[in-house]
Image (cartoon, rainbow, N blue to C red):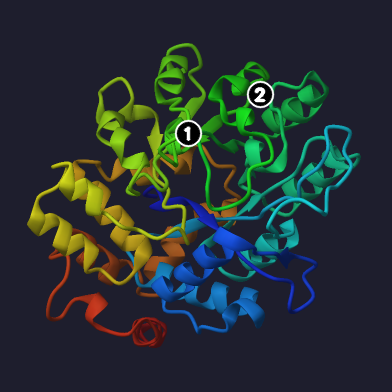
């Protein structure tokens, strides 16, 4: 069976409208950014105040089915906690409970559940075991935004349990501007040494690059750690963006590329203008990729134009804790007629008359369902 083509960094977003227990609180810059993202994605303008989980999940499923990907890792978002485990409801801009992504993964083979658990929680180990039983494929945290210090010795047993279960850690590294920062120093990838020493496979999201012009750049620190820790990887999510793309070409270096996995950071907008301005891609390649309406595919095609191979997006198959049913997904996809049009797009012209992307996403999804 072939490896799955996976986007391993896709955020679930919700507001708890339908009773999930989640919430979304946007102020200032983050409110403006959320509205910008909604417009970029073509969502209904009032979706932020409606049943956001349902609308978001439906559109996202259409994006996946109309792309060259087999599956995405859909990420929950933990609340901020104090180091003693007390939830800080006064901090943070959103909360997406683990059951939201676990339920969606149960319902759709294209979705893989990435759970989020603050290791200071009194029930952290119980919640970890519960999520493992339900099929979690990785654990995601944003240390600088959720107030998680991965080097805190009190969390050793949590990391050891993850290692025992073969559950990888996807940890945000580097600057952040899409959600509020609680403790900026926790963006340092060197703080990930403890989970690595405990045997956890760690994927440093964004390869420790800077998000804003004033952020520290930890890329070289992360790259130096690769030689010391064979279970350390990096994802190239959001690295088409204006600030992070400065190190995107560096990720193709022969000592780094084998440790790179693909992620998009959806719904963060995919704007490849700096890649063209810096000469990373030609004008024609920029225009071809930027014209693709599907943001998951647009992000990948920018990276493919720079030189990233298909292995970058299948490598996650060997890192994630994939349930047997998900490992068999590619065979099920072939049985339902999904593989041929996806391969046709991935290997053929990027777009133009007759492209999958000349059709509305709903029509693509309907046609592919009917073909099964």
Between discs 2 and 1, the one toward the N terminus:
2
Whole-percent x and y of residue 73? 53, 54
Q: Which mark is residue 195?
A: 2
Residue at 57% from the left image edge and 47% from the top image edge: 322
Q: Give the labeled residue for mark 1.
A: 215
| Residue 97 in view here | yes
Frontmost of labels 2 and 1 is: 1
Work out whether residue 12 can be spotted: no
Give me the residue at 52% from left, 23% from top. 231
In the image, is 188 to the left or to the right of 7? right
The disc placed on residue 25 is none
Residue 173: percent from left, percent from top = 53, 34
Report whether 29 appears left or right of 222.
right
Say which of 7 and 144 sits in front: 144
Distance from Cα at disc 2 to Cα at disc 1:
24 Å
Question: Which quadrant would residue 213 be assigned to in this image?
Answer: top left
**Residue at (63% x, 43% y) in the render:** 181
Number of residues whose C-alpha sits closer than 10 Å to that of mark 1, classed few (under 14), some (14–19) or many (20 or more): some
Q: Is residue 366 above or below residue 198?
A: below
Where residue 200 sits, quadrant-wise, is top right
Residue 240 picture location, percent across and down: 32, 48
Looking at the image, which residue is at 80% across and 67% down? 21
């Amino acid at each position: 069976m072939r490896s799955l083509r996976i986007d391993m960094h896709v955020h679930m977003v919700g507001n708890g409208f339908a009773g999930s227990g989640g919430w979304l609180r946007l102020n200032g810059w983050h409110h403006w950014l959320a509205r910008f993202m909604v417009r970029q994605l073509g969502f209904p303008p009032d979706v932020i105040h409606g049943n956001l989980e349902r609308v978001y999940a439906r559109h996202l499923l259409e994006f996946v089915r109309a792309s060259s990907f087999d599956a995405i890792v859909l990420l929950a978002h933990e609340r901020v906690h104090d180091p003693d485990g007390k939830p800080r409801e006064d901090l943070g801009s959103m909360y997406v409970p683990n059951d939201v992504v676990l339920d969606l993964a149960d319902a759709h083979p294209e979705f893989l559940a990435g759970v989020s658990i603050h290791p200071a929680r009194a029930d952290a180990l119980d919640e970890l075991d519960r999520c493992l039983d339900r099929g979690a494929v990785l654990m995601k945290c944003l240390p600088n935004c959720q107030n998680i210090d991965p080097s805190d010795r009190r969390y050793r047993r949590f990391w050891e349990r993850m290692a025992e279960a073969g559950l990888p850690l996807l940890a945000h590294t580097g600057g952040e501007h899409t959600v509020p920062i609680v403790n900026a120093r926790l963006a340092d990838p060197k703080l990930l040494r403890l989970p690595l020493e405990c045997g956890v496979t760690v994927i440093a999201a964004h390869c420790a690059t800077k998000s804003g012009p004033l952020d520290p750049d930890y890329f070289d620190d992360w790259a130096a750690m690769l030689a010391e820790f064979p279970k350390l990887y990096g994802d190239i999510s959001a690295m088409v963006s204006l600030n992070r793309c400065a190190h995107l070409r560096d990720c193709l270096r022969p000592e780094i590329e084998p440790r790179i996995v693909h992620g998009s950071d959806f719904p963060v907008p995919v704007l490849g203008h700096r890649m063209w301005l810096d000469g990373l891609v030609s004008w024609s390649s920029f225009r071809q990729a930027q014209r693709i309406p599907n943001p998951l595919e647009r992000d990948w095609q920018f990276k493919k134009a720079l030189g990233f191979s298909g292995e970058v997006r299948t490598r996650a198959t060997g890192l994630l804790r994939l349930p047997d049913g998900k490992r068999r997904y590619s065979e099920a996809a072939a049985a339902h007629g999904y593989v041929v049009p996806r391969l046709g797009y991935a290997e053929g012209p990027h777009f133009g008359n007759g492209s999958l992307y000349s059709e509305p996403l709903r029509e693509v999804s309907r046609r592919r369902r009917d073909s099964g």
